[in-house]
Amino acid sequence: QDQLVQSGGGVVQPGRSLRLSCAASGFTFSSFGMHWVRQTPDKGLEGVAVIWFDGSIKYHAQSLEGRFTITRDNSKKTLYLQMNRVRAEDTAVYYCARERGDGKYHGMDVWGQGTTVTVSS
Amino acid sequence: QSVLTQPPSVSAAPGQRVTIYCSGSNSNLGNNYVSWYQQVPGKAPKLLIYDNNQRPSGIPDRFSGSRSGTSATLGITALQTGDEANYYCGTWDSSLSAMVFGGGTKVTV
């Protein structure tokens, strides 16, 4: 079945970098847009970034101030989130999710299991 | 504060109906599709409604969605104890160029 398996979370010191991965299986990865969404008890769900099916279009949340970058490798069926200069407020559960379409928003129909990122010294 | 506004909680008896409202603005709900998600604690969200009123395969017709202007609603009929969860609305915000969500509504049966 369609599945997304995440890896790469953990504890990271403020100011350091971390890369999250999201491996897809069971569907044609290269045909779908992909999202990163994070969740905290205080802020709830927050859209982090989205990338079009072919990687040609990307959007990142303005609140990130250019610190995070979404990329994808369609040959490896894998989505990435490069997190640089992390801050305490980046502490959250991060989810990758499949967009129903090629990028323009319709809904996220397949979700990864979530990975916890904790920013702490 | 979330960009989209939802009531924090709703409750009803088994077998009854609840309606969850989601309010936004022209830059989000007013011009983009809304989707609805169900989330139980410790699990990832699950898509219930996409494109305002469409159900993915496997979602029972007890769940329905609609959008009008800058508001959207999720209806759940014939409530079951298994429907107890948090429900979120989500859409694209054209001004922010980002996904935005409501703060979530806890449904108690």
Image (tube, rainbow, N blue to C red):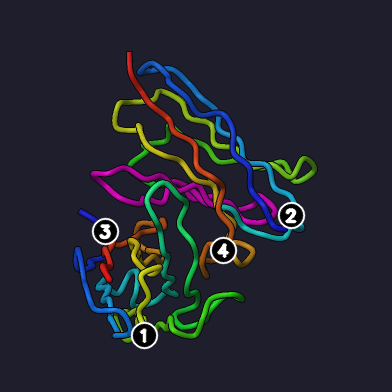
Q: Position of residue A73 (x, y in %)?
A: 72, 41
Q: Is residue A41 magenta?
A: yes
Please tell me which residue lies in front, B37 or A20.
B37
Q: Position of residue A41 (x, y in %)?
A: 27, 44
Q: Is the same chain shared between marks 4 and 2?
A: yes
Does dot 4 land on a helix, a strand or a loop?
A: strand
Please tell me which residue lies in front, B25 or A90.
A90
**In 3D space, how far apart are the residues under numbered discs 1 and 3 (Cα atoms)?**
22 Å
From the viewer's perspective, is the residue at label 3 or at label 2 nearer?
3
Question: What residue appears at the point 26 percent right and 63 percent down from the top-left corner?
Answer: B106
Q: Amino acid at mark 4?
A: Asp
Task: Please identify the quadrant where the N terminus of chain A is shown.
Answer: bottom right
Question: What residue appears at the point 20 percent right and 66 percent down from the top-left corner?
Answer: B9
Q: Disc number at residue A20?
A: none
The residue segment tinted magenta is A35-59
Please tell me which residue lies in front, B69 or A38.
A38
Residue B61's place in the image compared with A55, above or below, is below
Residue to which mark 3 is pinned = B103
Residue A69's place in the image compared with B108, above or below, is above
Q: Position of residue A43 (x, y in %)?
A: 26, 47
User: Seen from this angle, which residue lies furthest top?
Assistant: A121
Q: Amino acid at mark 1?
A: Thr
Does dot 3 land on a helix, a strand or a loop?
A: loop
Residue to which mark 1 is pinned = B77
Chain containing mark 1:
B
**Count of numbered circles in the view:** 4
